[in-house]
Image (spheres, helix red, strand yellow):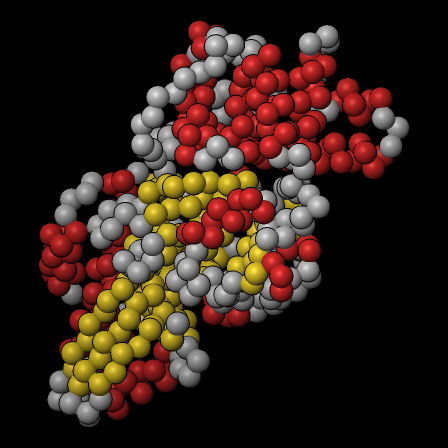
Amino acid sequence: MKIKRIAIAVALMLLFGLTGVKVGALWPQQQSGYELPAVVNKPILPSSFIDVERFDAQEKIVLERLNKRLQCNSDDYEASLLKGLLLFQVGSLESAIVELQSLTERAPKFQLAHLILGDLLLARFDQVGALGASFAIKNDSSKQNHNIQQLQKEARARLHGYLTLAGGVKIPRALIALSSNVKYALVVDKNKNRLYVYRNGGAGLPPELVEDFYIVLGKQAGNKLREGDLKTPEGVYFVTSYLPDEKLPPLYGSGAYPVNYPNEFDRRLRKTGSGIWLHGTDKSLYSRPPLDSEGCVVLTNHEFTRISKYVEVDRTPVIISESIDWLTSAEWLDQNIEIQVALETWRHDWEQADIEPYMDNYDESFWSKRYDKKSLAAHKSRVFRSKSFQKIELSDISVLSYPTQKADRPVVVANFIQHYQSNNFNGDMHKRLYMVKQQGDWKVLYEGRQ
């Protein structure tokens, strides 16, 4: 068995190839920057009133990234907001005011932008402390003060989410392999209130970061367990449909993409609830505070429209986790090969119709709609006796790592098309496996149709 797995690993390696800030002045916290994927180089002409010499090396990098975002999309309102904050950070007050004035004209409902602009205008005459503090002190309305606190939380979440990717490491563990039919994947980092869009890099190549967005999550922190707990679930999900705004109440803004919560694993864990969507924001608002939904993932309407070009119904995965585990390219490739070896071993042993090595691929806690491990072994024994040959091929393979707690066993979800031929039956099936790592080996935990 060990020799066979080594041989499979070598074959797969030959197949894939060896592919190998600072904003603490406003809200102190540990920072680390990250590099966005390269875009078409265009000349960046900073306005004459921006004194670039004020910027240190890290601030120049952040400014360049924000300018690149704005080059790609002049209506990237978050990039304008962050650029204004950065300019204020380095003492370019008038530059920051001009940036924020332009932003509020383009996005008049962006309440956070208006609040920051007010603080910057006040800074012409007085020292600015916490965001919105001056207004809060002068205002006797507890509702207004609550609104300001919510905007403060939104500002922190946007900054924290944009700046805290691990330095230079930008491959989520979750994205092990994407089928050629899956062009993009969405990865949600609940801790950072961030949604990352990754493009499929191709066979044997890591995915590429395309865009990332501020998102709103459930009002209660933690993993969803039951209906009505106001928590956002954590798991591997898939977009199941699209609902246009004209078919939805105003709360959902420009539209919605429902996902398949509860999935097979959720139901096994007795989780309840439904109606987990990616959707827009009430059109009377621009954005909402970080924890303000009933469990859905919420974007601004402008950004919801932007992600529509990345989403395909029944194909696009949405991985939601408390925090993202980031890998280097070498770590990602090692993980990819390890899982592909496990899938190939399972396929090979099934094709050989030898019941003992075949069932050794299954975890003791295996389940499906019809079988547990013991009853599956009995069923397969009867089937194998009727076979003079079997030919099994797998295509369109996607493998995604399931978010788990540190104490849990690692789990992956594999989707593929199974092509089956034998002396008495032929057929194709869209199949899904959940696989769990047990004492160093990957075992099938669940098997069923997609």
**Is residue 435 in view from this perspective?**
no
Q: Which part of the image, by quadrant, shows the N terminus?
A: bottom left
Residue shown at the point (27%, 64%) measured from the top left: 396
Residue shown at the point (19%, 76%) measured from the top left: 392
Pick out the residue farthest to the right.
Answer: 140
Quadrant in the picture for residue 107: top right
Q: Nearer the viewer, residue 138 or 103?
A: 103
Q: Which part of the image, by quadrant, shows the C terminus?
A: bottom left
**Is residue 414 in view from this perspective?**
yes
Q: In the figure, 42 relative to 190: above or below?
A: above
Residue 61 appears left or right of 337: right
Q: Nearer the viewer, residue 219 or 293?
A: 293
Q: How many marks?
A: 0
Residue 367 in percent (x, y) is at 42, 75
Residue 255 appears left or right of 108: left
Q: In the figure, 241 relative to 58: above or below?
A: below
Q: In the figure, 390 relative to 297: above or below?
A: below
Q: Nearer the viewer, residue 118 or 154?
A: 118
Residue 282 in percent (x, y) is at 67, 50
Pick out the residue farthest to the front.
Answer: 105
Residue shown at the point (14%, 60%) measured from the top left: 8
Q: Nearer the viewer, residue 36 or 8?
A: 36
Residue 441 in percent (x, y) is at 28, 60
Residue shown at the point (51%, 30%) measured from the top left: 79
